[in-house]
Amino acid sequence: MVNKVILIGNVGIDPEVRTLEGGAKVARVRLATTERLFDRQANETKEHTEWHTITLWRGLADVVDRYVRKGTQIYVEGRLRTREWMDKDNNKRYTTEILADVMNLLGRRSDNPASAEGSAPAYGQSAQGYGQSSPAGGYQRPAPQPAAPAASPAPSIPADDPDDLPF
């Protein structure tokens, strides 16, 4: 079975980045993808924009925090995840998001609003060990490493908790 999403789009609002009690970073990015379709009957091009919520953890969240702003074009590979939660009126609600495994910065550095704040790493390089470079350049979530016996486990967040993400 396959659960894979690949998106290229523009960030619509500055990312939300939080650090959990255990020190793990999590980022939420709203990404817009736009399809352009030609309507032969009306003889015009129509656009349809779809909005996606992307969740990035640890090293990828750190890269987002440092280099991604509203308007940044990014490439994302990840998995669809649907969560269920209860709202304040006790209604069952659902949200679908993409859990990112790979994120690449696209476009020219001069197009990136965050590039004025510092120099972004060259494409294809790992940003201070925050993952491995992927063949297309950018950043990839590191492979899971076995925990050392003395290390404390990362905080687990139950899937059925309505407040499972700190946003």
Image (spheres, rainbow, N blue to C red):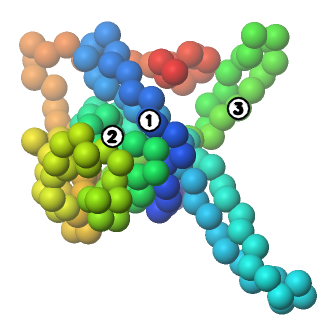
Q: What residue type is labelled 1?
A: Pro
Q: Could you tell me which residue is drawn at 16 percent across and 48 percent down?
A: 119
Name which residue lies at 24% across and 40% down: 117
- x and y, in percent, of residue 150 in the image: 9, 13
Disc number lying in front (2 or 3): 2
Lower sequence index among marks 1 and 3: 1
Q: Quadrant of residue 147?
A: top left
Residue drawn at x 38%, y 21% is: 18
Q: Which residue is drawn at 62% across and 64% down?
A: 34
Kind of residue sitting beneath label 3: Tyr
Tell me how far mark 1 sits from mark 2, CA to CA.
7 Å
**Does 46 sit left or right of 35 as displayed?**
right
Q: Which of 135 and 17 is in front in this view?
A: 17
Towards the viewer: 94 or 32: 32
Give neighbour class at mark 3: few <14, some 14-19, many 20+ (Cα, 10 Å). few
Q: In this view, does 20 lie above or below 59?
A: above
**Depth order, front residue of 127/84:** 127
Task: Say whether marks 1 and 2 touch (CB < 8 Å).
Answer: yes
Disc 3 element: strand
Residue to which mark 2 is pinned? 64
Q: Name the residue under label 3.
A: 94
For disc 1, the neighbor class at 10 Å (few under 14, some 14 to 19, many from 20) is many
The amino acid on which the numbered mark 2 sits, given as a three-letter code, is: Val
What label sits on residue 123 in the rendered view? Answer: none
Rendered position, 108 above or below 12: below
